[in-house]
């Protein structure tokens, strides 16, 4: 028999009316069911939102990866196309030089009035690829080529003083007569003459290369920095000097007044400028004709001067969409043989391409 006070004893479930199964004061059974359903709906909504976020993240990552792959493939394709097009431009330069040699075979003369000396201004590549009756024919298949622009030029490297002339003989010795033209050029440009001896000594060490400490032999004037030459001096002399595989003469038909003056000890500055003006009107066919034009017989000698050229630099620049690729090559011409000695991709100093 239960005690009359047993109904006041604590419940085994404690004071939790829901756990004890007792009705909550003021809450009906229908209200409790609605409360449980609301909690379930909130959990389902949260799970749905997390699922949407996860799917959106994965989709964005996949889309970004696909876009990245497409961009990489497009850039690689443009690079390969640009390389092939620049190689074609190089072959074109070689053909121009070969045809020039064939045209002048009876009387070899190279001057700035010849076709090879005319620079190619930036032009749409499609105008070269397909033309009929001087009218460009570009179809939809060549749509990419409509955005390709080619420019370039051929430079006579014997219009400059060759730094290899600083050295002579099998032992690459430095002689005083070899230094004089460069000392005169540096004086004209307002540069210290001590830099001439520095360059000559460094080139001598690089050519001999007997010790491990010997510097690498540079291939271009810009690489003189390998020998410790001040970059400011390199930038100043680069339009007037070259670095060729062998000793060469200065072409009087293409050289600047500074180079002609520096290479000729008995020539004053006024006569050098006069010679440039005369040759622009009528190129010289011989050294004697050049000397007679300024009234100084025998002032030029065949060991230092010439009216022909064997070494050229072919420069090409291709703009394909947003990509710009520049290439330059050293070309040697012997009679009808035109050979590429080296080529490199570099910014070779043409004015920056104007973007629309």
Image: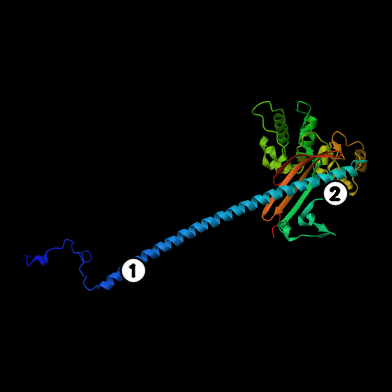
Q: Nearer the viewer, residue 341 or 167?
A: 341
Q: How is the image coloured?
A: rainbow
Please say whether residue 320 is visible from this viewpoint: yes
Please state the horizontal and vertical placement of residue 157, each as a whole percent of the image: 79, 41
Q: In which quarter of the view is residue 255 placed?
A: top right
Q: Which type of secondary structure does the marked residue at label 2 adopt?
A: helix
| Residue matched to label 1 | 38
Residue 243, horizontal then vertical, whole percent: 75, 37
Name the quadrant of the N terminus: bottom left
Q: Is residue 325 left or right of residue 17?
A: right
The C terminus - image quarter: bottom right
Q: Nearer the viewer, residue 7 or 353?
A: 7
- Asked if residue 55 lies left or right of residue 316, the reply is left
Relative to 136, say whether 101 is above or below.
above
Alpha carbons under labels 2 and 1: distance apart: 88 Å
Q: Is residue 139 left or right of residue 273?
A: left
- Residue drawn 66% across and 29% down? 214
Question: Where does label 2 land, which residue?
Answer: 115
Tell me which numbered mark, 2 or 1, is placed earlier along the sequence.
1
Query: Where does the image place residue 208, in percent across and percent down from the top left?
Result: 71, 27
SS for dot 1: helix
Considering every residue shown, the one lying at the far front of the view is 1
**Measuring 39% from the left and 65% from the top, which residue is drawn there?**
45
Contact between marks 2 and 1 (CB within 8 A): the answer is no
Q: Residue at x 67, y 51 (%)?
A: 77
54 versus 264 height, above or below: below
Query: Residue at 79% of width from left, 45% of height from top?
Result: 91
Q: Is residue 266 visible?
A: no
Q: Is residue 324 left or right of residue 279?
A: left
For label 1, count other residues whose C-alpha is less than 10 Å away and answer few (under 14), some (14-19) or many (20+): few
User: Comparing marks 2 and 1, which lies closer to the viewer?
Assistant: 1
- Residue 349's label in the rendered image is none
């Amino acid at each position: 028999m239960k005690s009359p006070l047993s109904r006041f004893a604590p419940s085994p479930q404690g004071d939790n009316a829901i756990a004890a199964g007792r009705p909550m004061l003021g809450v009906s059974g229908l209200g409790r069911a609605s409360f449980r359903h609301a909690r379930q709906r909130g959990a389902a909504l949260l799970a749905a939102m997390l699922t949407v976020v996860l799917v959106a993240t994965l989709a964005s990552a996949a889309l970004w990866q696909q876009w990245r792959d497409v961009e990489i493939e497009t850039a690689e394709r443009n690079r390969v196309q640009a390389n092939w097009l620049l190689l074609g431009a190089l072959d074109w330069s070689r053909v121009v030089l070969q045809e020039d040699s064939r045209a002048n075979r009876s009387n070899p003369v190279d001057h700035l009035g010849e076709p090879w000396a005319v620079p190619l201004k930036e032009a749409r590549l499609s105008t070269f690829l397909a033309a009929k009756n001087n009218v460009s024919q570009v179809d939809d298949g060549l749509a990419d080529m409509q955005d390709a622009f080619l420019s370039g030029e051929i430079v006579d490297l014997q219009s400059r003083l060759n730094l290899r002339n600083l050295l002579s003989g099998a032992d690459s010795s430095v002689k005083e007569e070899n230094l004089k033209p460069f000392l005169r050029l540096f004086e004209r440009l307002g540069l210290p003459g001590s830099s001439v001896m520095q360059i000559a000594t460094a080139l001598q060490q690089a050519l001999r290369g007997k010790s491990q400490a010997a510097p690498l032999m540079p291939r271009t004037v810009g690489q003189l920095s390998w020998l410790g030459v001040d970059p400011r001096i390199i930038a100043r002399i680069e339009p007037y000097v070259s670095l060729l595989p062998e000793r060469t003469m200065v072409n009087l038909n293409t050289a600047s007044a500074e180079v002609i003056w520096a290479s000729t000890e008995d020539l004053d500055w006024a006569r050098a400028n006069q010679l440039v003006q005369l040759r622009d009107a009528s190129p010289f066919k011989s050294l004697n004709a050049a000397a007679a034009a300024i009234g100084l017989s025998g002032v030029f000698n065949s060991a230092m001067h010439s009216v022909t050229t064997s070494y050229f630099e072919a420069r090409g620049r291709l703009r394909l969409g947003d990509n710009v690729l520049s290439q330059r090559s050293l070309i040697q011409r012997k009679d009808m043989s035109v050979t590429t000695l080296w080529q490199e991709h570099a910014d070779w100093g043409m004015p920056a391409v104007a973007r629309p």
